Image (cartoon, grey):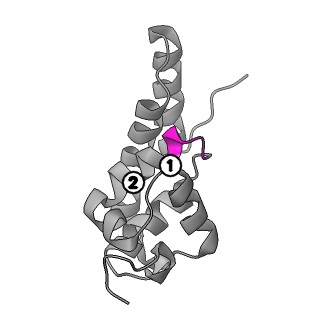
């Protein structure tokens, strides 16, 4: 099958559920997904109504690099968490007060600290 028409599920780590979500977001082939890159493609997923899941994001990054999904560790994983939080914030515009709260919560989550409620 030519790469132009190869299904998204032909990419290592991405199965039928990922493919269905990307198709709903308007990404219909492996070539299109690769051309968009992980961040732009994941942003499209979020904007199409998909729930944000960090594991799904880093699996996508690893998939587009041709790496096993569980190859993401340490500093690389921490950097991807920061990028993931930025994508989530970009996907859901908020008023400034809500955005500040979301950013503070993201930072606390990043460092493993939970705000007392």
The answer to whether one can see residue 97 in this image is yes
Q: Residue at x 50, y 50 (%)?
A: 25
Q: Residue at x 48, y 43 (%)?
A: 110
Q: Residue at x 40, y 32 (%)?
A: 90
In the depicted view, which residue is nearer to us: 17 or 54? 17
x, y percentage for residue 81?
A: 43, 50
Q: Tell me the residue that label 1 is attached to.
A: 45
Q: Is residue 36 above or below residue 89?
A: below
Q: Is residue 49 above or below residue 67?
A: above
In the depicted view, which residue is nearer to us: 59 or 74? 59
x, y percentage for residue 40?
A: 34, 49
Quarter of the figure with the N terminus: bottom left
The answer to whether one can see residue 111 in this image is no
Is 115 on the left-hand or right-hand side of 19? right
Q: Quadrant of residue 78?
A: bottom left
Question: Which disc is residue 41 wearing?
Answer: 2
Q: Predominant secondary structure in magenta?
A: loop
The kind of secondary structure element at disc 2 is helix
Q: Is residue 58 above or below residue 95?
A: below
Q: Was residue 23 drawn as part of the magenta stretch in this picture?
A: no
Q: Residue at x 44, y 52 (%)?
A: 42
Is 109 on the left-hand or right-hand side of 74? right
Q: Residues within 10 Å of mark 2 (few under 14, many from 20)?
A: many
């Amino acid at each position: 099958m030519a790469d132009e028409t190869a299904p998204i599920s032909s990419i290592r780590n991405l199965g039928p559920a990922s493919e269905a979500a990307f198709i709903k977001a308007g990404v219909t082939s492996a070539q299109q997904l690769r051309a968009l890159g992980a961040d732009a493609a994941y942003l499209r997923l979020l904007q199409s109504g998909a729930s944000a899941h960090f594991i799904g994001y880093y699996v996508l990054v690893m998939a587009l690099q041709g790496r096993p999904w569980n190859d993401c560790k340490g500093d690389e994983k921490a950097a991807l968490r920061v990028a993931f939080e930025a994508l989530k914030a970009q996907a859901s515009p908020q008023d400034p007060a809500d955005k500040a709260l979301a950013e503070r919560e993201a930072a606390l989550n990043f460092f493993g600290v939970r705000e007392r409620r």
